[in-house]
Image: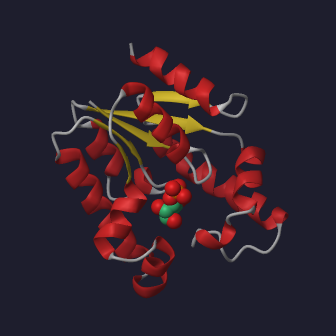
Amino acid sequence: MKLLLIGYMGSGKSLIGKMLAQAMQLPFYDLDTLIESNYGAPIPTIFSEKGEIYFRKLEAKILRETLESNQNCVVALGGGTPCYAQNMQAINAKQDAFSIYLQTDLPVLVERLLSELKSRPLIAHLKSKEDLTDFVRKHLFDRSPYYMEAKLKIKTSAFTPAQVVEKIVLQLF
Ligand code: S3P
């Protein structure tokens, strides 16, 4: 089985993913890292050299390659992965893939993202906490229908990463 973690930037996909992989004794992959290795440069460089559309095409290709592999694993997707190229459809069509949405409240996302603006090309231009809050509120609203297509939805804001992992594991068995 492939366990695919989805959720907005800052929802903890990578941290929870690594911990979940450890708990399940499965290998962990980060789709952003697979994309960076394939292209040979960090995500912000891909955006600045080639633009977002190129990035989305590469993201869809690497996602499909990952879905086609026979390996059981945990994969953290990018925040936008479910929202492009019919990726959620591709994920949910796979018998051996199980999608998990980490549902995180706006104020928690904003606090986490404030310190990491520069490493995230979609929000790097925002100048204040208010601008970031407005942007994330609308973006999250637009993306939620895709995220809600996940098989399992887990509210994360009131829980530690270990508790979130425990909740996921309990739902899997
Ligand atoms: C993106 C999220 C990023 C990365 C890229 C685009 C998005 O991944 O894929 O910067 O569209 O939300 P994380 O959610 O892991 O930060």
Residue 39 sits in quarter: bottom left
Up/down of 79 relative to 56, above or below = above
Residue located at (20% from left, 54% from top): 65
Residue 21 sits in quarter: top left
Up/down of 39 relative to 95, above or below = below
- Looking at the image, residue 67 sits to the left or right of residue 3; the answer is left
- Looking at the image, residue 22 sits to the left or right of residue 92; the answer is right
Can you say which quadrant of the picture contains the N terminus? Answer: top left
Residue located at (42% from left, 78% from top): 46
Residue 89 image point, x, y percent = 30, 44
Residue 101 image point, x, y percent = 50, 36
From this viewpoint, which residue is outermost toward the bottom?
A: 49
Residue 6 image point, x, y percent = 47, 43
Q: How is the image coloured?
A: secondary structure
- Looking at the image, residue 70 sits to the left or right of residue 120; the answer is left
Q: Relative to the observer, which residue lies in front, 7 or 160? A: 160
Can you say which quadrant of the picture contains the C terminus? Answer: top left
Residue located at (62% from left, 51% from top): 10
Residue 132 sits in quarter: bottom right
Q: How many marks?
A: 0
Residue located at (62% from left, 33% from top): 161
- Looking at the image, residue 69 sits to the left or right of residue 172; the answer is left
